[in-house]
Image (spheres, rainbow, N blue to C red):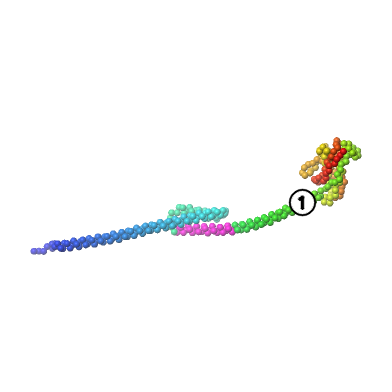
Amino acid sequence: MEENKYDYTPEEGYDEEIEAQKAVKKSLRGYRIVVIILAILLAGISVLYFSLNHQQQQDYKLLAEDRDSIQSDLKSLIVAYDDLKYQNDTIAAQLQKASDMIEQLKYERRLNYNTIKKYQKEVGTLRTVMKNYLRQIDSLNKLNKQVIGENVNLRKEVSTANLRADIAEERASELQNKVRQGSVLGARSISIIALNSKDKEVSRVKNAATLRVDFTVAANKLATTGNREIYLRIISPEGYLLATKAMPTFLFNGEKLGYSASREIDYQNEDVSVSIFYKGSGFVAGAYKVELYSDGYLIGSAELPMR
């Protein structure tokens, strides 16, 4: 009988099944290893991604902090430039540049290391320029203080000189006044005489037609020589000025004064006896006041009784 090649014993079938199961288990083990490896790779990639993302965020945060620091520095520089209070086109340009940089930083979206370094360099340049200005201004302030000190000393010297000049001028003025006063004519020995119509002396003033005032202009070596006008004022006992119808006047201390009569004399630094006459009527008894003026000065006065 021919042997069937497809016939097999139970033992052979069992062995094949065991081999098949082993092959499946081996395949599953291989898949598991692959899955585990993929899982490990995925986890590593995830960790790397998150790490890189975190680092990027940290870097951006640091760049943003640098940007904020630059903005703060720029604002400080603007305040410093503004505090200089100095009318200068160059300073104004630097101030405008700092303001423009702040505006650029506000709208800067692509922050990177090079951009930050660029801004930091420009801020450093602005700060250096400002320091130079501060040094110049400090030097100017020192020079200004020195000039002010010199001006103060000069003012003191000028003030002292002016004070001395004022004192000298005052003394000169006083001396001039003394000389002027010393050169004023003086009248002494003043008397009043009543005369009738025939120019005879009378004892009763009511009988007088003329009043004669006699006096002596004293010698004064300081007075200038030449012709002098003497003005006579006679004040009646009633207190009014005896004057003519013409009511003549002369200047005394800037004011016009009426006078009774006048006379011109030739003065040569020697005593001069002078008589001045006043014609009138209606004289009454009492005390008559006599005043004599010349060159704008009162040179003599007296109060004389008349019977």
Depth check, front residue: 303 or 235: 303
Whether residue 12 sits left or right of residue 89 in the image: it is left
Whether residue 221 sits left or right of residue 130 in the image: it is right
Q: Main secondary structure of the magenta part?
A: helix
Depth check, front residue: 44 or 186: 186
SS of the residue at dot 1?
A: helix
Whether residue 37 sits left or right of residue 146 in the image: it is left
Residue 127 visible? The answer is yes
Q: Residue at x 54, y 57 (%)?
A: 130
The residue where tag 1 is placed is: 174
In the image, farthest residue toward the left: 1
Depth check, front residue: 303 or 63: 303
| Residue bounds of the magenta highlight | 114-140
- Name which quarter of the figure residue 285 lies in: top right
- Name which quarter of the figure residue 287 lies in: top right
Q: Residue at x 83, y 45 (%)?
A: 300
